[in-house]
Image (cartoon, rainbow, N blue to C red):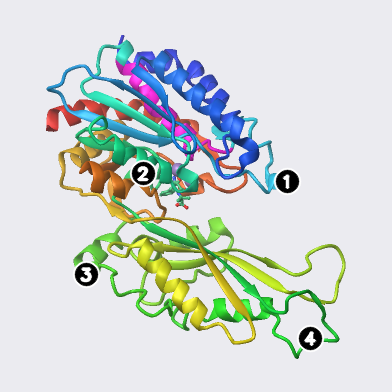
C-alpha cells in the first residue's frame, strides 16, 4: 500500500482520534484542569505507542509530564526530534464560542475546538504521519518524539528536562508544526520566532478604596496613573520609550527587508479580515516587518476599580496590568525585563507605589534557509502543494526553540500548517481538514528528503 492509500483509507479514524484528543480540556494555565492535563498526557502516550513508537513514557517534571517516545531504525540514519505541545490556552470567554470549545465540531471543512490548530491538530499530524510511514514500510529516519504540556505557560520545566537529557535527545534536527503558513495555496515556512518578556504591574494609590467625591482630584487615582504610565511607553512614532530597549536589536539588511516586503501580503484583505479601518504600528516599517523583525510592547489585560453593574463612585486603591514585549534577535528577555522594571518604577509619580512582577520569558530564534533540513522541508511542501514555499518571519514565540539550539546544538524547522485566520488563543479556534491531511501527507516527504540531503 502507498502512503497516500493508507492516509485515504484512514481519514475517518485519524479524525476521530484527533476529536478524542480535543475533547480533553488540557488547559495548563488553570490548576482546576490539572487532572485533564494528565489525562491528555496519557492519551497522547497511548496514541504514540499505538502508532508504533518504542520506549514510550511519561517523563515526570516539577510540572506537567512530557510524553516521550522514539523509533530508532538505524543508527547511521539521521534522527529527527519532533516537538509539540498537548496543553492549550484557556477557552474563556466561553460565551463567544459558537460551539463548545471542548466539543470538537466539523463545519464547512474546519474543525472547531480549543487546540484544534494550537497545537493538538498540528502535533497529531506527526503521530499519524509516523503511523503511516510505519504501516507502509517507508520510515527513512530515526525519530524521537517529545510532546510537552507546558508550552502555553513558558516551558520552564521542559527547559530543565532538555538540559538534563541532552544525550538522550541527540538528533540532527528539530521538527515542529506549531506555526502557520500564508494561505492554503501559498505555502510558506517560518524562519524566525520572536522572544517574549512578560510582566505584571500593580499600582497602588491610597491604602483603601475611597469616595471619589470626597477624595477625587486630590489623591492619585492608580487607574488614571497607570494609564498615563502605559501611554508614555510609546512615543508619537510608536517607538518604545524604555531607555536601551532597542540597543541589542539586530538590524536586518536592506536586501532582507526588500525580500520580506515581496512576500505576498494584502493589506486591504488584512484590515477587512480584522474589521479595522486602519493598521497601527511603528513608523518606518511595513506590517510584515512590524510583526516579523521588530520588537513590540502590548498590554494584554488591565483591571481595577469597580466593574460591576451600574455605577459606583469610587477612587480605587489599586490598578493592575499585564504587559508583554515581543523580542527579536539579539535582545534577551532577562535584560528587557530588567529595563522595563527600572523604567516603570522611575516614571511612577511620588503619589503611587509600583510593583512589577516578571512572568515567563523566552528568547527569539531564527532558523537557516540554507540547511539540508530547510531544503528537505521546502522540497516536501513543493511536492504536495505544487509550489515552492516562501520563507517568512513569524511573530509568535516558542520559547524552547532557542534552548534546542543553545543546549542541543540543533536547528529547528518550523513546519507549520496553520493559518492566521485559525483564531488560535481566541474563541472559535479552528483547523482546516485540508491542513490536517495535507500535513500528514507532507511530513513523510520531509523524512524521505532529509535522509537524502544528509
Ligand atoms: N504556537 C504558538 C506560537 C506561534 C503562533 C508561533 C503562531 C508562530 C505563529 C505557541 O503555542 C504560543 O502561543 N506561544 C506563546 C508563548 C508562550 C510563552 C505563552 C505566544 O507566542 O504567545
Ligand atoms: Mn503552540
Ligand atoms: Mn499557543
Residue that appears at 24% across and 16% down? 138
Q: Is residue 376 magenta?
A: no
Number of the front mark, 3 or 1:
1
The residue beneath circle 4 is: 216
Number of the front mark, 3 or 2:
2
The residue beneath circle 3 is: 254
Q: Position of residue 180 (x, y in %)?
A: 40, 45
Q: Disc 3, disc 2: CB below 8 Å?
A: no
In the image, the segment drawn in magenta is 114-133
User: How would you classify the magenta stretch by its main secondary structure?
Assistant: helix
User: 10 Å neighbourhood of mark 2: few (<14), some, or many (≥20)?
Assistant: some
The residue beneath circle 1 is: 95
Q: Is residue 192 left or right of residue 22?
A: left
Number of the front mark, 4 or 1:
4
Quadrant in which the C terminus appears: top left
Residue that appears at 51% across and 48% down? 421
Q: Position of residue 253 (x, y in %)?
A: 20, 68
Is 360 above or below relative to 123?
below
Q: What is the secondary structure assignment of the residue under circle 3? A: helix
Number of the front mark, 2 or 1:
2
Q: Disc 4, disc 3: CB below 8 Å?
A: no
Label whose residue precedes the other's in the sequence (2 or 1): 1
For the residues marked 4 and 2, what is the alpha-carbon distance in whole angstroms?
A: 48 Å
325 or 430, nearer to the observer: 325
Number of the front mark, 4 or 3:
4
Q: What is the secondary structure assignment of the residue under circle 1? A: helix
Amino acid at each position: 500500500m502507498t502512503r497516500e492509500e493508507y492516509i485515504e483509507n484512514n481519514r475517518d479514524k485519524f479524525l476521530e482520534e484527533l476529536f478524542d484528543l480535543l475533547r480533553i480540556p488540557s488547559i495548563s494555565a488553570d490548576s482546576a484542569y490539572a487532572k485533564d492535563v494528565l489525562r491528555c498526557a496519557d492519551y497522547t502516550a497511548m496514541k504514540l505507542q499505538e502508532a508504533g513508537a518504542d520506549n514510550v513514557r511519561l517523563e515526570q517534571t516539577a510540572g506537567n509530564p512530557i510524553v516521550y517516545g522514539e523509533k530508532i531504525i538505524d543508527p547511521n540514519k539521521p534522527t529527527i526530534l519532533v516537538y509539540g505541545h498537548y496543553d492549550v490556552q484557556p477557552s474563556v470567554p466561553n460565551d463567544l464560542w459558537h460551539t463548545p470549545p471542548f466539543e470538537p465540531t466539523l463545519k464547512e471543512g474546519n474543525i472547531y475546538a480549543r487546540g484544534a490548530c494550537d497545537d493538538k491538530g498540528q502535533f497529531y499530524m506527526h503521530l499519524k504521519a509516523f503511523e503511516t510511514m510505519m504501516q507502509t514500510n517507508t520510515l527513512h529516519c530515526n525519530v524521537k518524539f517529545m510532546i510537552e504540556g507546558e508550552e502555553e505557560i513558558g516551558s520552564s520545566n521542559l527547559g530543565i528536562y532538555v538540559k538534563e537529557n541532552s544525550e538522550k535527545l541527540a538528533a540532527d534536527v528539530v521538527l515542529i508544526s506549531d506555526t502557520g503558513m500564508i494561505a492554503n495555496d501559498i505555502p510558506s515556512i517560518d524562519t524566525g520566532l520572536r522572544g517574549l518578556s512578560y510582566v505584571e504591574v500593580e499600582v497602588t494609590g491610597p491604602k483603601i478604596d475611597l469616595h471619589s467625591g470626597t477624595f477625587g482630584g486630590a489623591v492619585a487615582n492608580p487607574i488614571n496613573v497607570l494609564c498615563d504610565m502605559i501611554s508614555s511607553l510609546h512615543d508619537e512614532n510608536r517607538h518604545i520609550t524604555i531607555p536601551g530597549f532597542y540597543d541589542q536589536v539586530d538590524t536586518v539588511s536592506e536586501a532582507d527587508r526588500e525580500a520580506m516586503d515581496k512576500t505576498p501580503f494584502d493589506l486591504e484583505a488584512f484590515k477587512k479580515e480584522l474589521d479595522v479601518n486602519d493598521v497601527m504600528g511603528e513608523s518606518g516599517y511595513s506590517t510584515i516587518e512590524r510583526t516579523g523583525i521588530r520588537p513590540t510592547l502590548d498590554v494584554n489585560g488591565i483591571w481595577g476599580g469597580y466593574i460591576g453593574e451600574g455605577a459606583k463612585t469610587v477612587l480605587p486603591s489599586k490598578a493592575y496590568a499585564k504587559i508583554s514585549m515581543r523580542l527579536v534577535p539579539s535582545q534577551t528577555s532577562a535584560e528587557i525585563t530588567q529595563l522595563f522594571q527600572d523604567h516603570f518604577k522611575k516614571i511612577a509619580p511620588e503619589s503611587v507605589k509600583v510593583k512589577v512582577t516578571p512572568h515567563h520569558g523566552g528568547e527569539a530564534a531564527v532558523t537557516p534557509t540554507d540547511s539540508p533540513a530547510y531544503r528537505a522541508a521546502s522540497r516536501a511542501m513543493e511536492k504536495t502543494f505544487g509550489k515552492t514555499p516562501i520563507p517568512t518571519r513569524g511573530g509568535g514565540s516558542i520559547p524552547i526553540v532557542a534552548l534546542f539550539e543553545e543546549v542541543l546544538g540543533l536547528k529547528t524547522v518550523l513546519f507549520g500548517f496553520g493559518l492566521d485566520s485559525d483564531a488560535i488563543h481566541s474563541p472559535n479556534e479552528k483547523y482546516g481538514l485540508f491542513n490536517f491531511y495535507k500535513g500528514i501527507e507532507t511530513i513523510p516527504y520531509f523524512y524521505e528528503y532529509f535522509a537524502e540531503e544528509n
